[in-house]
Structures are given as C-alpha cells and as structure tokens.
Amino acid sequence: MSDAVLQVSQLNVQFGAHAVLHEVSFDVREGESVGLVGESGSGKSTLARAILRLVHCASGRVEWRGEDLLSSPPAVMRAKRRELQIVFQDPKASLNPRMSVGAAVGEPLKIFSPDLNATEAGRLVDAMLLRVGLDASMTRRYPHEFSGGQCQRIAIARAMMLNPRLLICDEAVSSLDVSIQGQIINLLQDLQRENGMAMLFISHNLAVVRHLCHRVLVMFMGRLVEIADRGALFDAPVHPYTRALLAAAAFSGAPEPAAEANAGERGCAYRHRCRHALPLCAASAPALREVQPGVQVACHRALEPGFRYS
C-alpha cells in the first residue's frame, strides 16, 4: 500500500442542533479497501455523503490527494467528481426509471467528456456493460425490466465509466440475495484489481467486510471507536462496542438497534452500555489512540496497565 489518497480529519456534521458526525478522522490508501461498520443510525451513510460534499460539513477537512474538497471552489469540486464515485444501497432508487440503461451508464461521459462522439461513447458503454456481466443488447431497456442484482451491476457500470480512483459503496449489496451478493463482491474485487482504485465499503454484513476489506473502521453514534487491520479486528477486537458488535452478528446476523443519542454529547457515547465505564467516561470523550501496531481505539481504559475487557 502507498501513502493515503483520502485523508479525513476532524470532520463534524450537524443537522440543525443535532451532531451526526463528531471529530471523525481516518485515511484510505491507494488500492486499499476500507470497511465501515456500525449500527443503523450511527452515521455511516452521512459520512459517505460528507466525503463527496453531498451534505454540508460543519468543520473539518476531507483531503483528496492533498487537496481539501470542502474548501474547493464548485468548478474544482465538479472536476474532482470524476475521480470520486458512489454506489448506493437501492439501485432501482438510484437509477432514473425514465432513462434507458445505455443512457444511464453513458451519462458520466456526456457530462465529463462532451466532445466524445456518439459512436465512441456507445462503444465504451457496451464494453462496460459486458465488463459487469451484462449484455450490450440491454442498452435500450429500462431499470424496471431488470432484477435487483442486474440493476446494481448497472449502477456499478455507471460509477466505473470514468475509471474513478475512489469508489464508495454505501450498503451496495445489503438489498440483494446472498448468492447475488457474492457475485457483486467478486465483481467489485475484480474491478478494484484492474483499476487500482481505493474503496470505502459501508456494510452491516461483517462477513462480507472481513472477506473484502484490508482495514475496518467501527462507528458508534457518529464517532469512530476503533480502526484496525482486518485480522486484528476480527481475531482480537479491543473496544467493548466492537466486541459486542461481532458477538451480536455471530448470534443474530445483525447488530442491536442504535440508541437515541447526540454524537456531540459530552463523554463517551458508549458508556451507557459499557460495564467497564468510569466517571472519567462521563466527563470526557476518549480520543482515538494507537494501542498496538495497526490498531487505534477510542477508550479511556484501552491503555490501562493490566486491564482486560470481559
């Protein structure tokens, strides 16, 4: 892995008086797959949209190859979007029902390569559809004529038309059947290897994250509580929330619902569930600190000599 191409620093997002993301910092390296996991309502999708400036950020930095996207003029940000693409959870909702498949997949070319003639654009669209496992003859058909898995392939084809350097997948396989999930995951891995792109993969499915990602970010109520290499996180999770999340997934296949709380509240947001909480946990929010090589944890007790979570 080379140096980071995406660096998110102290990112804060508020919806009115409600803090949704609080002091979020992490990076993604060239060619790396980074997983983002956590309960529903923890802020994962908001983070994806904040990175792409699809929601307003109260403060912080999102640097793409050293340039802060949040302070970039609109024209500069528009040019950067060809390098930064996203695939959403519901492909049928993200595809225009009035637009043919060929038009949808070719739309990025129309926007970013307006001088490209129709013949060459059509050739590129046909080639991309074939690359994602669809037939080029499907270009005249519409989204309602396809299955969910086929629509997700179409959405991926559209995102890949500009050869992005970062692909954000926001629950891109959660609405698909298990057998189709496997096909889409394999497709994403193949495309990543071929293009050398980085990927931020948001998912509830911890098994998929373990299979696909090099590193994993764990989010709880708008804060990152653990960042670790895949092996370290799944074999020896440190933060009590990470341990609970993995245990819940093992027993029920899904984490418990998120509690109502403000990401910007004082103290550790997890202290209400944590049997190891101290008065300090209510007084101040712990910062992410490296507790061992490749593992960062936001817990006041993580560096306490001889302390072990149970």
Image (cartoon, rainbow, N blue to C red):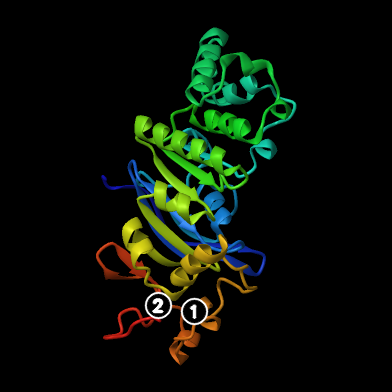
Residue type marked 2? Cys
Q: Residue at x 51, y 82 (%)?
A: 271
In the rendered image, residue 278, in percent from the top left (x then y), is placed at 45, 90
Q: Residue furthest top?
A: 119
Image height of 31 relative to 122, above or below: below
Q: Residue at x 51, y 77 (%)?
A: 270
Judging by the rendered image, the residue that carries numbered circle 1 is 268
Secondary structure state at the residue bearing disc 2: loop
Quarter of the rendering occupied by the C terminus: bottom left
In the rendered image, residue 178, in percent from the top left (x then y), is placed at 56, 44
In the rendered image, residue 168, in percent from the top left (x then y), is placed at 49, 44
The reply to whether dot 2 and dot 1 touch (C-beta < 8 Å) is yes
Quarter of the image for residue 300 reads bottom left
As rendered, which of 244 and 260 lies closer to the eye?
244
**Can residue 155 be seen in the rendering of this structure?**
yes
Q: Is residue 256 left or right of residue 242?
A: right
In the rendered image, residue 109, in percent from the top left (x then y), is placed at 54, 22
Secondary structure state at the residue bearing disc 1: loop
Quarter of the image for residue 188 reads top left
Q: Residue at x 43, y 29 (%)?
A: 163
**Res 299 label:** 2
Q: Disc 2 and disc 1: Cα gap in Å? A: 8 Å
Task: Estimate how packed mark 1 is, as few (under 14), some (14 to 19) or many (20 or more) residues with alpha carbons within 10 Å.
Answer: many
Please tell me which of labels 2 and 1 falls first in the chain. Answer: 1
Task: Estimate how packed mark 2 is, as few (under 14), some (14 to 19) or many (20 or more) residues with alpha carbons within 10 Å.
Answer: many
